[in-house]
Amino acid sequence: MYPTRFFSLLAGLLFAGQAVADWHYDKQAIMGTEVHLQFWVDDDSRADEINRAVMDEFRRIDNQLSPYKERSELSRVNRIAGEGSGLQISAELAEIIDKSLWYSKKTGGAFDITFATVGSLYDFRKGQQADRKTTDALLPAVNYRHINLNKKARTLAFSDPRTKIDLGGIAKGYAVDRAVAILKRYGVHNASVSAGGDARLLGDKRGKPWLVGIRHPRDKSRNAAAIPLENTAISTSGDYERFFINDDQHRVHHIFNPATGRPAETDSSGDASDSDKLISVSIIGPEGFDTDPLSTSVFVLGKRKGLALIERLAGFEAIVIDANHRMFFSSGLQQ
Ligand code: ADP
Ligand code: MG
C-alpha cells in the first residue's frame, strides 16, 4: 500500500504546468436569488478568472437595476422620473425598458413594469400586502403608457407622478444572456448559467443534453418534469417562488395582474376557472431577454390566451401547469 501522499505527489508531478480540462462549478447569492454557474474549461488555470468575470457581471447588473439598492440607477429613476421633465438614463437601462414596453404591447398589458406602483408596497418575507383602498387609488398609475422613453435621446419620464417601475420580470433573463456572452468571449463552448428561474444553456453537456428540472409547484422535494435542452434559454415563473398565505387563506404571490393591481389569479378576461389559471409557466426560446418576460406574461394571461401567444411567436415553446396540477405543452413540444 502506498500512502496517499505518494499519489498526490505523483499527480502533482504529472499535471505540473499542464492544462487540465474539467467542469467548473460555482454558486453565489446575487439579484435576490441563487446564481448557478457550470462550465467546461480546456485549461483550468483560467477557470477562476472566467468565474469571476461572470459573477462580477451579475453583481454589476444587480447594482444598477435593484429596486432595493438606494444607489441603483433604477432607484434614481423611481425617485425622479415622476417629476415629468425627462431624466437621462444609461443605454443599457433604455434597452431593457424598451424591450419591456415591446412586451407590454405584445401582451395587451399583461407584462407591465409599472406593476411596481403597487407591487413595491408588498413585502413577501414580512407577509405584507397593499390594502384594497390603496390599490384601487393607485391603479390608474399602473400603466406602461405612463412611461415616456426617448430611446435616441435616452431620456425617461413618467406621466403620472405616482408611477414606479421594477425590472424583476426581465432582469435575470437579461443577465444570463450577458453571462453567456462573457463565457463565449473566453472560448467556453459548454455551460449552464441560471439565476433563480431563468437559465441559459451554452452548447450541450459534452455529448449529452442538459437536463433542466421544472420544479413541482406544490412539492419542493421533486420535479414536475426534466427537459433535455441545449443551446437555448428557459425561464420559469411560478406562484411558489415568493409568496405568503394571508388571513383570508389567499396565496399572495409576486406575479401581478396589472389590470387589477393584485397578484394574478385569473386571466385578464376574468375567467377564474381552475383549468385556465396557471401556477407554473416555463418558456423555452433562444434568449433569456425574451423567455423571462414571456414566462411572466403567460402566467398573467392564463392558459388559453398565454398558450395562444406562444403559438403566434416563432421560436418559442411553453410548458404550463394549471391549478389542477395538469401539465400542457405548446404544439412544438407535443410528440
Ligand atoms: P422570478 O423572479 O421568480 O424569476 P418571474 O420571472 O416570474 O419570476 O418574475 C416575477 C417578477 O416579475 C416579480 O418578482 C416582479 O418583480 C416582476 N413582475 C411581477 N408581475 C409583473 C408583470 N405583470 N409585468 C412585469 N413584471 C412583473
Ligand atoms: Mg419572468
Image (tube, rainbow, N blue to C red):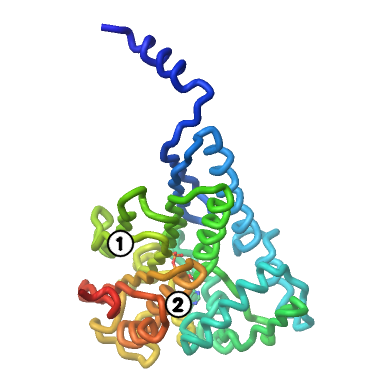
SS at circle 2: strand
Q: CA distance from mark 2 to mark 1?
A: 21 Å
Would you say the residues marked 2 and 1 are in contact, meaning their CB atoms lie under 8 Å apart?
no
Q: Give percent across and percent down for residue 81.
A: 72, 77
The residue where tag 1 is placed is 214
Residue 260 relative to residue 154: left or right = left
Q: Quadrant of the C terminus?
A: bottom left
Cβ at disc 2 under 8 Å from ligand 1: yes
Cβ at disc 1 under 8 Å from ligand 1: no
The residue where tag 2 is placed is 256
Please indicate, yes or no, whether residue 132 appears anywhere in the rendered image. no
Residue located at (64% from left, 58% from top): 69
* Camera-side mark, 2 or 1: 1
> Which sits earlier in the primary sequence, circle 2 or circle 1?
1
Q: Residues within 10 Å of mark 1 (few under 14, many from 20)?
A: many
Residue 90 relative to residue 194: left or right = right
